Image: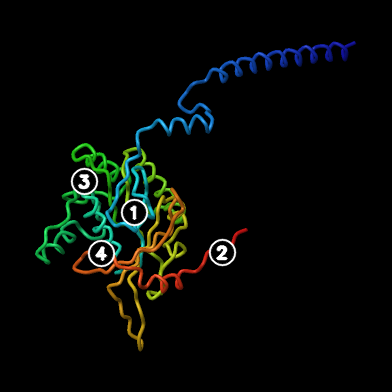
Amino acid sequence: MENEIENFIKKIEQEATVIKDAHEMERITEVWATYNGEDRLISSEDIAEKLRNAPEEKKLHTGIKSFDDILGGFRLKQLVVIAGATKNGKTSWAIELTTRLKESQPLWLPFEESSEELVQKFLDRKENPPHFYAPEQMKGNTLTWLEKKIIEAKVKFDSKVVFIDHLHFIVQFSTERMDAEIGRTMRELKRIAKKWDVVIFLIAHLKKTKMEVQPTLEDLRDSSFIAQEADTVMMVWRKTERNDGRVEIGNEVNVSIQANRRTGKTGNIQFKFENGRFLEVENKFDSYVRKLIPEPEDKF
């Protein structure tokens, strides 16, 4: 008799649970069927229609035809990495882009080489420096401080491009996982670029490489996240040769666009570095560069 009563009570409890779950599911269904928040689900057709009706996307062109043809112009909200070996012209190339994007009111955050040192190079050549803004004193190196300076530049000058020299000055070395910390920093920079509608140009160093060989994405120092998180990666390389044990660094420069998230288009643009400027030349040593860049492995 007692077992029958216990079984009856359990049956009632189970039925009550089913009823409760049914009511709960009905309520959940009703809520989500009418959900209209900013993160609601929409179709790819809706996304396409939204993009068609959006204002034309602003593109920043450098005026270097072959370069602009590959990238189609820089776009706001992008994170662009400029990499290369020491003394191969990373900062000089960033200055060249600063000169060509002066209408975008460039902001410089120079941690390695001060803004005074950058300007002095032009004064030494009896030239006016390119137009940019920089902190009078570099008072911080955290992402929070960096974001504040970007906000200041946006509010005061309507800056649309930001140059940071360089990555390892803003990575916090409080963890043993350097690669993971770099990945976090890259994602934060991308967030800042998107939030404040700017293009961030980030200078990055390479691990030790052969100077006479054009570097590739695999040569980026400390973390593969640098290439993975960036929208564009370009490598600056000065043609270098060894003759009788001597290293000869020439004025021929190759800017190799090796990652381009937007279109996937890559390529090499050759310059002659003269009096602090990059002068585009015909691809006379393009075949030499191509031989040094290994063909990508077939993954399929």
x and y percentages locating residue 129 in the rendered image: 14, 57
**Label located before the other in sequence (3 or 4):** 3
Amino acid type for the residue under numbered disc 2? Glu
Residue 109, x across and y down, in percent: 25, 51
* Disc ID at residue 297: 2
How far from the left and from the top, in percent, is residue 127? 11, 62
Write down the residue under mark 3. Answer: 105
Looking at the rendered image, the disc whose residue lies closer to the viewer, 1 or 3, is 1
245 relative to 153 in the view: left or right: right
Sequence order check, earlier mark of 1 and 2: 1
Looking at the image, do the residues carrying marks 1 and 2 touch, with CB atoms under 8 Å apart?
A: no
Identity of the amino acid at label 3?
A: Gln
Q: Nearer the viewer, residue 151 or 54?
A: 54
- Mark 4 highlights which residue? 278
Residue visible at 60% across and 18% down in the picture:
28
Label 1, label 2: how far apart the Cα atoms are = 27 Å
Q: Going from the N terminus, do you reach mark 4 or mark 2 first?
A: 4
User: Label 1, label 4: how many angstroms apart (C-alpha)?
Assistant: 15 Å
Q: What is the distance, in whole Å, between disc 4 and disc 2 at their CAs? A: 32 Å
**Residue 209: in sight, yes or no?**
no
Position of 266 relative to 287 (above/below) = above
Q: Quadrant of the N terminus?
A: top right
Foreground disc of the pair 1, 2:
1
